[in-house]
Amino acid sequence: MYQHTTNPALSNPALRSGAAYDVIVVGGRAAGAATAMLLARSGLDVLVLERGAYGADTLSTHAIMRGGVLQLSRWGVLDELVAAGTPPVKRTTFSYSDAQVVIDIKASPGVDALYAPRRTVLDPALVRAAADAGASIHHGTSVNRLLWRGDRVVGVHATTEDGRSVELFAPLVIGADGIRSTIARNVDAPFTRVGEHIAGSVYGYWSDVETNGFEWTFRPDACSGVIPTNNGQVCVFTVARPTRLGRGRVGVIEEVLAEGAPDVWERVRRGSAPKGARMWSGHVSYMRQSYGAGWALVGDAGYFKDPISAHGLTDAMRDAELLARAVVDGWNGGVSRDALADYQKTRDRISEDLFGITDRIASQQWDDAEISELLIRLSASTNAELELLNSFAAEPVS
């Protein structure tokens, strides 16, 4: 099994109450670490506070689409993921009704394959890149509340890994702390769009399963997928209404897979099954107001959609770059509110179609004709995102 290197934050001095930074990022996983890395590479003094342990696992769809791979390549992180044994994915197959659509991944600058790293590989790689850029990173540190001066956020109150309370200051606090974001709750960030449907998911890691890239199967209330990941394993998942999935277990995955994708099930059945599975009980999709006086949100803290589209990690890294560029472009001892407004406007514009498509797929109420149309639209909806990211390639944040 691949072992990530020693936590680069171990050499950081202890947090000191009253210390000031340019930016404090709350949350140090994909969105937060990427944002911190890009800001630090631009010369800002960045502090990252992550309540979890370094290298800890988390719920994830794993899959990174073309836009995300492009960014990881530009950022110099992709080689580390490949060295960790993350298998290249050269083909994606969509199955629905009696149809099967096979898409071969065509090589382009920075992208010769797709990847689906375990979060125990991806997150530490981004954290190390942020630390190498000069960001100060502290795991095991929980942010309890924000500090205010009038109606402006000016810092955070946090509890360190050794139990000390500290007050830390910055002209900008970024919440990258997930769907239950402390920062979003403290600023009372309103929802600007909310989905209508919730799907649940159960997944586990099988060994010795023959695969042919990403394989997605769409059946009403019996969606499933196979995602090659690290350590010779594949992530096998099923998606259905939460009432069907119950508490989630390996047997549920097997039952849904056998019903909705019998050909895939035959291959999975011959592999080595895990002892347990992980359950995602679902959450309504949303977009939040993601900026204000002294604060911003990125990743799931500001924008979340059902994981059935497997686009969450790609969105997280995309939005990290959008936000980092907005902060740097508008920086003058603090960040321009107009720059943050442009960040949200761009994020919402390129997310709007995919948000609606994903919410409809999550309903599990479509027929074969509609899912065919939805999948075509799903593919097309990523074009604007990829075009935008490609426009950044000549002038990466550095």
Image (tube, rainbow, N blue to C red):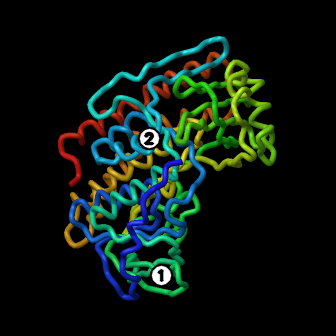
Provide residue 237's location: percent of width, then percent of height: 66, 37
- Please name whichever residue, 349 or 54, is drawn nearer the observer in this view of the structure: 54
Left of 270 or right of it: where is 77?
A: left
Q: Residue at x 69, y 28 (%)?
A: 268
Q: Residue at x 48, y 54 (%)?
A: 3
Q: Residue at x 50, y 75 (%)?
A: 141
Q: Earlier in the sequence, mark 1 or mark 2?
A: 1
Q: Residue at x 70, y 42 (%)?
A: 202
Image vertical order of residue 213 relative to residue 125, above or below: above
Image vertical order of residue 55 relative to residue 198, above or below: below
Find disc 2 in the rendering and name its residue.
Answer: 351
Left of 129 or right of it: where is 139?
A: right
Image vertical order of residue 79 relative to residue 144, above or below: above
Left of 215 or right of it: where is 292?
A: left
Q: Tag 1: residue type? A: His
Label 1 or label 2, whichever lies nearer to me, is: 1
Provide residue 385's location: percent of width, then percent of height: 36, 36
Q: Does the image show residue 358?
A: no
Find disc 1 in the rendering and name its residue.
Answer: 157
Q: Secondary structure at mark 2?
A: helix
The image quadrant of residue 219 is: top right
Q: Secondary structure at mark 1?
A: strand
Q: Tag 2: residue type? A: Ser
